[in-house]
Image (tube, helix red, strand yellow):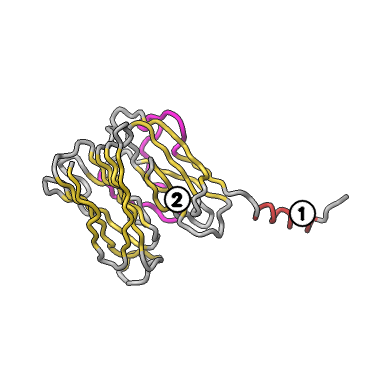
Amino acid sequence: MRIPLLSLSLLGCAVGAWAEPAAQLDGPVGGWRHSGLLEPQQGPRVAYPTPPIDRGGQRGRSLIEGRLQGLEGQRQPHRLVVNGNPLPLYTDAQGRFVRPYNFGAGSNSVELASADGQSLKRVQFYEADSLKTPARVRVVLGWDDPKAELDLHLLTPDGQHAFWADPVMSNGGGLDVDSVDGPGPEMFTMTAPLHGTYLVYVNYWGNLGSGGYNFQAGSNQNEVITAQISLVFNENTPNEKRETFLVPLRGIGDLQLIKAFDY
């Protein structure tokens, strides 16, 4: 029996509509890697949904990039979980995404999940770069509004202040990733922490639209922005400990003290 072409076309559309969600992860790949050999420094990369204008102070960052399929029309953000740090993940209309991250030495993992929590893809790899030292203190910031710009601020016991305008500290700490295209991540790392009190702040700096940055209330996407901050000690070691904070931000200029801790 012959099936009319129109019926085949409709059948194809139905199959596409019923396709199971899936994730393609182009990088990083699983296994053993030495970033100094496998990932030479290249020029600026195009990222989605917008380029990650990255002014971090340290080198060795990697791009997590890929595509989510079968999720067209579903709500965002989806979820990117890196070494247990959950971050909001937005894509372009074709499902593509690129996010910067600075992986530490040792075992690392990347997981992609849909907005409803369905796990789509997970890779595990071992970073064997001998030049990388495990992070003793790591702070990761993400947020759920791609049209807002939030900033991470860290004050260290010797009085130094790491933020977007001064990302590198003389004590060895600094911002690895300062993404200014929304919704992060922003990341602070210190491999040899000073003893004393640290202060972690998050600032709702402004908004980001097609015309660039602005300070117009309501030009962002959500009435209340949820910032998610992960504080990680001794990452990728048997002594790893972490805390996660969810903080609402309502207006441009909001500055929240997230955590004061002693090391």
Callout 1 crowding tier (Cα within 10 Å): few <14, some 14–19, many ≥20: few
The verdict on residue 41 being magenta is: yes
Q: Is residue 39 above or below residue 188?
A: above
| Res. 8 mark | 1
Can I make out residue 163 in this image? no
| Left/right of residue 56 with respect to residue 34 in the rendered view | left
Outermost bottom residue: 217
Q: Is residue 201 above or below residue 195?
A: below
* Location of residue 235 by image quarter: top left
Q: Is 105 or 136 nearer to us in this picture?
A: 136
Numbered range of the magenta stretch: 28-57
Q: Which of the marked residues, 2 or 1, is nearer the chain's N terminus?
A: 1
- Identity of the amino acid at label 2? Arg
Q: Secondary structure at mark 2?
A: strand
Whether pointer 2 and pointer 1 mark residues with C-beta atoms closer than 8 Å, the reply is: no
x and y percent of residue 174 in the render? 23, 45
| Res. 79 mark | 2
Can I make out residue 205 in this image? yes
Outermost left residue: 158
The verdict on residue 46 being magenta is: yes
| Left/right of residue 158 with respect to residue 256 in the rendered view | left
- Identity of the amino acid at label 1? Leu
Q: Is residue 251 above or below residue 202?
A: below
x and y percent of residue 42 in the render? 38, 40
x and y percent of residue 217 in the render? 33, 72
Q: Is 44 or 255 nearer to us in this picture?
A: 255
x and y percent of residue 184 in the render? 35, 53
